[in-house]
Amino acid sequence: MIRSALFSVASKGERAVRKKIDVENGPLGIRLEYTGPHLNQDHFKAWQAAVHLANERGGLQGDQLVVPVTDVMRAMGQNYRDHDQRTRAWRLLGDLTEANVDLYSSRSKYKAPLVFSVLHEEATGKMAIRLNPDLAQLLSDEVLQNDMLRVLGFGRNQIAIWLHNYYASHKTPPGLSVRELQRLCGTSLDLPRFRQRLRGALDRLKVGVRPLLLSWSIDENDVVRVEKIPTQVKLLPVTAREKMETGRRHAGAVQAAASSRARVVL
């Protein structure tokens, strides 16, 4: 889904009803329709935080995952002590409960919200997040070990975040025209303005403590070519995916047993 316009680089947009989302043509033959509030890269960071915490703590099987709000905020790159940031994070997660995705690929079908439910109890500082158990199968089709700290370093540069996730998800990124990148990332900018912002975002990917890109160029045919550091991404064969799911189910059962006495109804 990070190779699509589902999480757009446009900060604002209209609510969608069965909108066909532009996606990259790939081996899984993905088709994507979406109904719900406009999603941007801030929503992506909230969703990534929820999935990361669920995967880390055995919550990908549909069980209620109860975590300190500080952990959620930290994973989103937010400051828990900032009331405005807490309010905004809550709104982003709330939007994700209304974000209904119809995804079809050669391996998987997923028709559900990105987040089933999210509850917050101010008194205890706990948050309960529930994800669809079918999400685990969807996420196991292709595995990317994303550098979340690098993503958080881009702040609210929506194009830089989208480009990072797109290029990080490729072992060898393909050359794409500026117009194709404009289509895939869901920008509302016209081509000249997008090209200008694109150059600045690509430069952002070359700097910092852990830069993703080693170099980039736009050739005479307006095709963007990049050279990047290695990232861990692979398309799993079905047998490997099944083994991973077995391991996740076992880990989820262990986590559920360990945390059952600490579970709260918020």
Image (cartoon, rainbow, N blue to C red):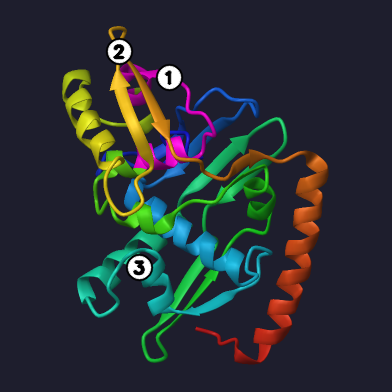
Q: Is 168 above or below relative to 247?
A: above
For the residues labelled 1 and 3, the Cα–Cα distance comes to 38 Å
Return the x and y of residue 157 as percentages of the image width and height. 24, 46
- Above or below, 235 against 55 in this view is above
Q: Secondary structure at mark 1?
A: loop
Name which residue lies at 51% across and 47% down.
Answer: 100
Give the crowd class for mark 1: few <14, some 14-19, many >=20 residues within 10 Å: some
Q: Nearer the viewer, mark 2 or mark 3?
A: 2
Bounds of the magenta segment? 162-182
Residue at numbered disc 1: 175
User: What numbered label is drawn on residue 219?
Assistant: 2
Q: Earlier in the sequence, mark 2 or mark 3?
A: 3
Between marks 1 and 3 in the image, the one whose residue lies nearer the viewer: 1
Q: CA distance from mark 2 to mark 3?
A: 43 Å
- Residue type at mark 1? Gly
Query: Which residue is drawn at the image coordinates 20% and 22% (left, top)?
Result: 190
Query: Badge 2: few (under 14), some or many (20 or more) residues near its Cα, within 10 Å?
Result: few
Contact (CB < 8 A) between labels 1 and 2? yes
Which one is nearer the viewer's eye here, 15 or 11? 11
Query: Residue 77 got which mark?
Result: none
Which quarter of the figure has residue 80? bottom left
Residue closer to the observer: 137 or 130: 137
| Closer-to-camera residue (16/2) | 2
User: For the residue marked with disc 2, what is the amino acid?
Assistant: Asp
The residue under the point 40% across, 51% down is: 44
Tag 3 or tag 1, which sits nearer the N-term?
A: 3
Which amino acid, mark 3? Trp
Q: Which residue has dot 3 on it?
A: 90
Seen from this angle, which residue lies furthest top?
221
First in sequence, mark 1 or 2: give its number: 1
Residue 242 in picture, x, y percent from top left:
80, 50
